[in-house]
């Protein structure tokens, strides 16, 4: 069997950096080509090939796929929920056209697999708030959520109509320390750790009791790779899998941080992101992913807090 050659698009972002490094460990440095519109992230420098690439330029993307003998694409370029509300047209255009460009090229070049993440943002105020199931009422109210929901059905369509093996996860809010988050509603759960160390205080843009589904980055990276490495026969969902770990609120993280930094204080000043957060479920039922490909999270809030503070301090 020919060796895998993986193209990661959006590799300098919050997920891209860690996913690229993890893929390079598995497949070999030279087999994973990182690409982004912005410059190569410092953590990627010297770890493998990097190309500057605009995913919206389909011709250039196609050239790179052929030139690099790409067999798999991980598409991570997107505009997230909070930034999306500031420029809805641009968010819709980037989030949907980038996916169509990749799916078309995957079909034409008969790529082995494509990965494209969706989000809990597909759910809206009419979806169940607790243990939101895989299949339910889905009426998103943000342009980001609308673009992700449309994208899920493009994935299913390309799989059914053209046999493209595209796989997807609806990530919850992701917490990490290696690279900064890129304009989401859940970004507070990263900022709070940085500010706790630097300022011993944080002003949250979400209210104290705003519960959201969350996950630590090592769990998210493992989920992604486990899904991509699963036997295709096990994949029953060709839109996007619900995948969950934990749910907490800004008040919960603050209490946990205080166990490590006793003089840490938090204030609350909800802004436009509060409304976005309130439109999403507080927790997710991911039993289909657990049954289909054995998904299981490892990190809870105390473990995430200790690990985040430890790594940011050092
Ligand atoms: P991010 O904003 O940190 O990274 C996205 C990267 O894409 C950036 O480095 C950006 O420069 C790049 N990019 C933007 N436009 C591009 C273009 N035209 N061509 C090439 N690259 C371009 O985002 P992230 O948090 O790493 O998210 C990655 C994916 O995961 C997105 O699809 C996002 O919707 C999804 N997701 C993320 C989270 C989260 O909490 N981080 C949760 C749910 C879903
Ligand atoms: N973390 C993402 C956001 O807040 C969820 O998709 O936009």
Image (cartoon, rainbow, N blue to C red):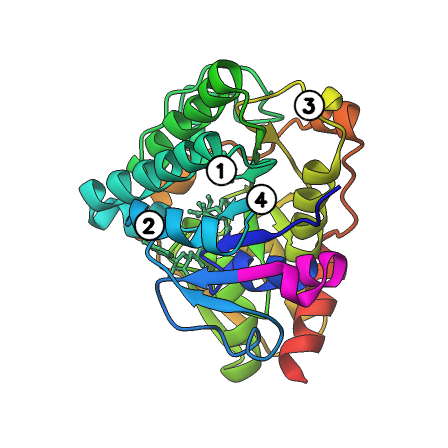
* Label 1 residue near ligand 2, CB within 8 Å: yes
* Label 2 residue near ligand 2, CB within 8 Å: yes
SS for callout 3: loop
Which of 214 and 288 lies nearest the eye of the viewer? Answer: 288
Earlier sequence position, callout 4 versus callout 3: 4
Which of 8 and 300 lies nearest the eye of the viewer? Answer: 8
Vertical order, 308 against 300 (above or below) = below
- Could one spot residue 262 in this view of the protein? no
Earlier sequence position, callout 1 versus callout 2: 2
Vertical order, 67 against 30 (above or below) = above
Q: Mark 2 points at which residue?
A: 82
Instruction: Kindly identify the residue that appears in the image at 79 percent across and 49 percent down.
Output: 298
Over which residues does the magenta segment extend?
23-33
Disc 4/disc 2 C-alpha distance (Å): 29 Å
Q: Is residue 29 magenta?
A: yes
Disc 2/disc 3 C-alpha distance (Å): 31 Å
| Occupied quadrant, residue 256 | bottom right
Q: Name the residue under label 3.
A: 235
SS for callout 4: strand
Instruction: Kindly identify the residue that appears in the image at 65 percent across and 44 percent down.
Output: 224
Q: Is the magenta stretch mostly helix, strand or loop?
A: helix
**Is mark 1 in CB contact (under 8 Å) with mark 2?**
no
């Amino acid at each position: 069997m020919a060796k895998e050659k993986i193209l990661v698009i959006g590799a300098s972002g919050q997920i891209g950096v860690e996913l690229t490094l993890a893929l390079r460990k598995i497949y070999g440095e030279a087999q994973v080509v990182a690409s982004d519109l912005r410059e190569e992230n410092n953590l990627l420098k010297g770890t493998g090939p990097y190309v500057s690439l605009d995913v919206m330029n389909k011709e250039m993307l196609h050239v790179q796929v052929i030139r690099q003998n790409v067999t798999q694409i991980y598409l991570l370029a997107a505009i997230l929920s909070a930034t999306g509300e500031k420029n809805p047209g641009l968010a819709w255009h980037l989030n949907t056209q980038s996916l169509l460009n990749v799916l078309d090229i995957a079909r034409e070049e008969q790529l082995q697999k494509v990965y494209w993440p969706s989000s809990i943002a597909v759910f809206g105020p009419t979806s169940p708030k607790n243990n939101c199931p895989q299949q339910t009422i889905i009426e998103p109210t943000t342009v980001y959520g609308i673009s992700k929901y449309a994208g899920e059905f493009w994935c299913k369509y390309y799989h059914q109509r053209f046999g493209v093996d595209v796989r997807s996860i609806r990530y919850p809010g992701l917490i990490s320390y290696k690279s900064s988050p890129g304009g989401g509603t859940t970004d507070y759960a990263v900022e709070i750790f940085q500010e706790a160390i630097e300022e011993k205080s944080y002003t949250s843009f979400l209210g104290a009791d705003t519960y959201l589904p969350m996950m630590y980055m090592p769990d998210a990276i493992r989920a992604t790779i486990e899904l991509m490495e699963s036997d295709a026969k096990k994949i029953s969902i060709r839109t996007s899998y619900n995948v969950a770990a934990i749910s907490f609120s800004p008040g919960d993280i603050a209490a946990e941080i205080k166990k490590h930094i006793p003089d840490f204080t938090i204030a609350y000043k909800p802004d436009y992101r509060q409304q976005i957060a309130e439109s999403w479920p507080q927790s997710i039922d991911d039993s289909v992913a657990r049954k289909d490909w054995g998904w299981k999270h490892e990190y809870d809030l105390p473990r995430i807090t200790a690990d985040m503070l430890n790594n940011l301090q050092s």
